[in-house]
Amino acid sequence: MKRTAVLLWVLAPLLLALSLYRPFEDSSARATRLPARVGQWLRTGTSTLTDDTYRLLGTRDAAWWTFSDGQGHEVYLVAVFHGLNWKSAHPPRICIEGSNMTILAESEVTRGGGAGHDYALLRSRSKRDGREYVSVYVYGTTDYVTPSYSSYFLHHAPRALLRRSTSGYLLRAECWAQGDAAAAEARCADFLEQILPMAKDLVR
């Protein structure tokens, strides 16, 4: 018990410094190298990220795009890539709640009985018009993918302390539910599964 307390006292300043240290990273253009076509989805729009957004993220290596499947469905992709500043990838509920949304549910989903990738799921509702919004997302590196921010933190924090940080990303696919939240979730999850290998390749 005494050894544990001493260890915590020794590590506390390092962890505090790590939490406060947020180096800004110029874009390495990985986000913009994601393809304009992902399976049946074609990129049809680009949303502008402001200087304030880049400053909050700590990186310019980010994109916010609209994809359409030609059948009246749209999926919005938010992609944030990082190098040393792994804290650029934050929990998406921060952005969702900051966009005048109320979080209805949050969970982690195991896809395909564990055979496919797992993802985090957020269901929210617009405070303006009551429409339901679905977001699915993952954090990852070249060989590591998780739906959990706490797992993501525990993966990167020790490496940062040892100056062995690795590049990674946050991928977020989302859309309006259009009256069928389950179908919206399936569309976003399928899109995420298709674009995930492309993100992995960009951080190799």
Image: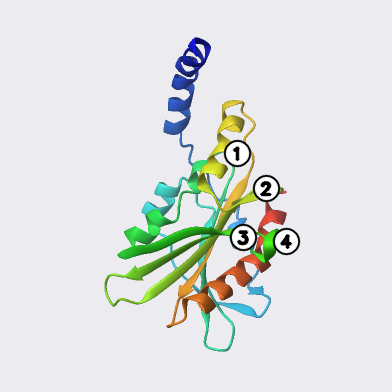
**Residue to which mark 1 is pinned:** 155
Image disc number at residue 144: 2
In the image, farthest residue toward the left: 128
Verify CB contact (< 8 Å) between mark 4 and mark 3. no
Mark before the other along the chain sequence, 1 or 4: 4
- Residue 173, compared with residue 10, is above or below; it is below
Helix, strand, or loop for circle 1? helix
Helix, strand, or loop for circle 4? loop
| Mark 4: few/some/many CA within 10 Å (<14, 14-19, 20+) | few
- Image position, residue 52 (x, y; %): 36, 52
Q: Residue at x 41, y 62 (%)?
A: 105
Q: Nearer the viewer, residue 190 or 75?
A: 190
Whole-number angstrom distance, CA of label 4 to CA of label 3: 9 Å
Image disc number at residue 110: 3
Asked whether, in this view, residue 168 is left or right of residue 15, the answer is right
Mark before the other along the chain sequence, 4 or 3: 3
Verify CB contact (< 8 Å) between mark 2 and mark 1. yes
Mark before the other along the chain sequence, 2 or 4: 4
Question: Disc 3 or disc 2, which is closer to the eye?
Answer: 3
Whole-number angstrom distance, CA of label 2 to CA of label 1: 9 Å
- Residue 105, compared with residue 186, is above or below; it is above
> Which amino acid, mark 4?
Ala
